[in-house]
Image (spheres, rainbow, N blue to C red):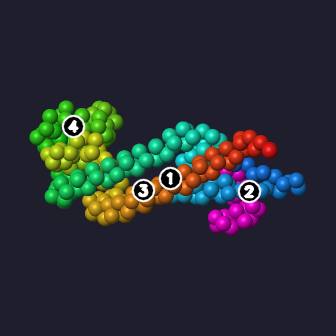
Amino acid sequence: MRPVDLARRHGLSTQAVRNYEDAGIIAAARRSPAGYRDYTAVHAAGLAAHLALVPAFGHSTGRRIMQAVTAGRLDEALEHVDAGHALLARDRATLRAVEAGLSHLAAATPDAAARTRAPYSIGELARHLALDPATLRGWQRAGILAPPRDARSGHRQYLAPDVRDAELAHLLRRGGQPLGAIATILGELRDAGGLDALSASLGPWQRELTSRGVAQLYAAGRLAAYIDALDQEGGARAAPPLAEG
């Protein structure tokens, strides 16, 4: 198969095919006596697998998977696949934690920090929330709060955003959320820019996870086909000639 034929089959340029070969994503092509590349069905299966892996695992991980498979390091490739599945599972767990937290946050009063003075010392904020200061320190260790320190005294200063996060964390704790989930929820809330923005992001977030999950299923089939093609080619090369007579 000529490079142009392989490229057209997958919607690529001939240079892209050569680049994939040079990078070890697909195996090196055989050369004709005149020096021209001669690609086979194995290379076609490899390109199909690579193109399926990119939307499933990203360019970097997809490249590593293909390079490992092409070089015969199957266990290494499977470790990258496993890591991609684990990442998707963690992202799903994060989404579920945020969804559960929002059901409690929806009942919160609008931006409680706007109605209170700031900054607070740790003792003042603890009294404001009817908590022990040790609880606030524990929330900081868990990544829920990150109050700045006074430049002169070195004491924690809880500014308006910190007071808001502490009040929301207190609300979520009363709702039964673990500290790790609260840190995740408040991190997503800060990134989104507010409760409404975070709520609006849940639908697209879920659709992205679903799309990635389906892509991983499709990529698994393409990758398995490539592994089978490599095995069959290797077996054909290693097979002894048939005895005559």
Q: Secondary structure at mark 4?
A: helix
Q: Quadrant of the C terminus?
A: top right
Residue under label 3, please give it. 213
Instruction: Count neighbours of disc 3 (C-alpha within 10 A) and say few if under 14, some if 14 to 19, many if 20 or more.
Output: some
Which residue type carries mark 4? Leu
Cα–Cα gap, marks 3 and 4 = 38 Å
Cα–Cα gap, marks 4 and 1 = 46 Å
Which residue type carries mark 2? Tyr
Is 137 within the magenta? Answer: no
Mark closest to the chain's N terminus, 3 or 4:
4
Residue under label 1, please give it. 220
Q: Nearer the viewer, mark 2 or mark 3?
A: 2
Magenta span: predominant SS is helix
Instruction: Count neighbours of disc 1 (C-alpha within 10 A) and say few if under 14, some if 14 to 19, many if 20 or more.
Output: some
Label for residue 39? 2
x 32%, y 53%: residue: 95
Residue 85 image position (x, y, % from top left): 43, 47
Label for residue 136? 4
